[in-house]
Amino acid sequence: YYDNAAVLTRKIQKHFAQYINIKDEIYDPIQLHARKLKIDLIIAVDTNYVDEKISTVNISQFFLKNDIQKLTIAIATKQHQLRKDIFQENLFKFFNSEDFEKSDEITNIDDCFDLVGSRFSKERVVDKNFKQALYNRENMSSTAFGRVAIPHSLTMSANKSRGFIIINPRGIKWSNNNEVYLVIALAIDPDNKKLFRDVFDELSNIVTDINNVSQLVHCNSYSEFIIKLVDLL
């Protein structure tokens, strides 16, 4: 009507140019699903339409301050959800359910390295020298910070990029007389550094918060731990 749709589209695209790409203008929801486009967000104008499967935000054709605020929130919410979805997908690739251990019998760094070294070797994630590589790195400086330790080797020499999770709510004696409750051992494949980096960047942001660590330590299973990690992002 009087080219209002095109004018509004240009305004929205200009205002949110860094965050969205408007793929199309449609006038009937049937068109939306018929075209089978990959869509993250529907901007519905002058209507109360809500899609059951796709995030929807309703604004007016006048693009007022309130409309801008609603769109800002909707975009930020969707971005966060997409980030969580990607993080969860990467976690399932990086951590296997077999590589999760919660036990009060794992009481020190030697117990951890014995378990990780033997399990990863058996799964052919690393070679037989991996346990010594963990000690070599630890001898340089402690990989513990706060109540968490993230041991790893100095070189990226693993066959696969994988992580191993160990929890002991009663504490694990670490190097330099530190005590940790959560250990996340890392094996890094030089040909798959991206997966490691994608997981590690998000993971490190989470475990630097002591309150987050307290919640993770209470997890009793692999699935519960993964769900909690994603929830804390």
Image (spheres, helix red, strand yellow):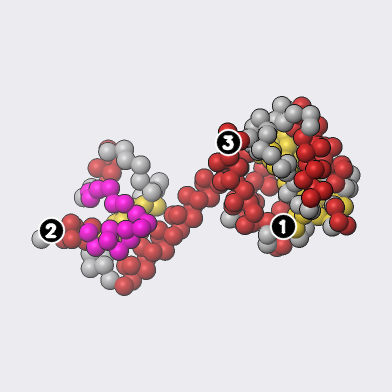
How far apart in space, not on screen, are marks 2 and 1 (Cα)?
54 Å
Task: Identify residue type, mark 1.
Answer: Val
Q: Is residue 12 magenta?
A: yes
Disc 1 on helix, strand or loop? helix
Tally of marks: 3
Viewer-nearest residue: 54 or 138: 138
- Which residue carries the number 2 mark? 3
Q: Residue furthest bottom?
A: 65
Task: Tell me where residue 55 appears, x and y as whole percent.
Answer: 40, 52
Q: Is 218 positioned to the left or the right of 56 in the image? A: right
Along the polypeptide, which appears first: circle 2 or circle 1? 2
Residue at figure coordinates x 58%, y 45% from the top left:
197
Task: Tell me where residue 50 appears, x and y as whole percent.
Answer: 35, 54
State which mark lies toward you, 3 or 2: 3
* Mark 1: few/some/many CA within 10 Å (<14, 14-19, 20+): some
| Circles 1 and 3: CB atoms closer than 8 Å | no
Which image quarter holds the C terminus?
bottom right
Q: Is 10 positioned to the left or the right of 128 in the image? A: left
Task: Identify residue type, mark 2.
Answer: Asp
Viewer-nearest residue: 25 or 143: 143
Residue at figure coordinates x 37%, y 68% from the top left:
69
Viewer-nearest residue: 38 or 126: 126
Along the polypeptide, which appears first: circle 3 or circle 2? 2
Task: Tell me where residue 222 appears, x and y as whole percent.
Answer: 70, 42
- Which residue carries the number 3 mark? 192
- Which residue carries the number 1 mark? 213
User: Magenta stretch?
Assistant: 10-26
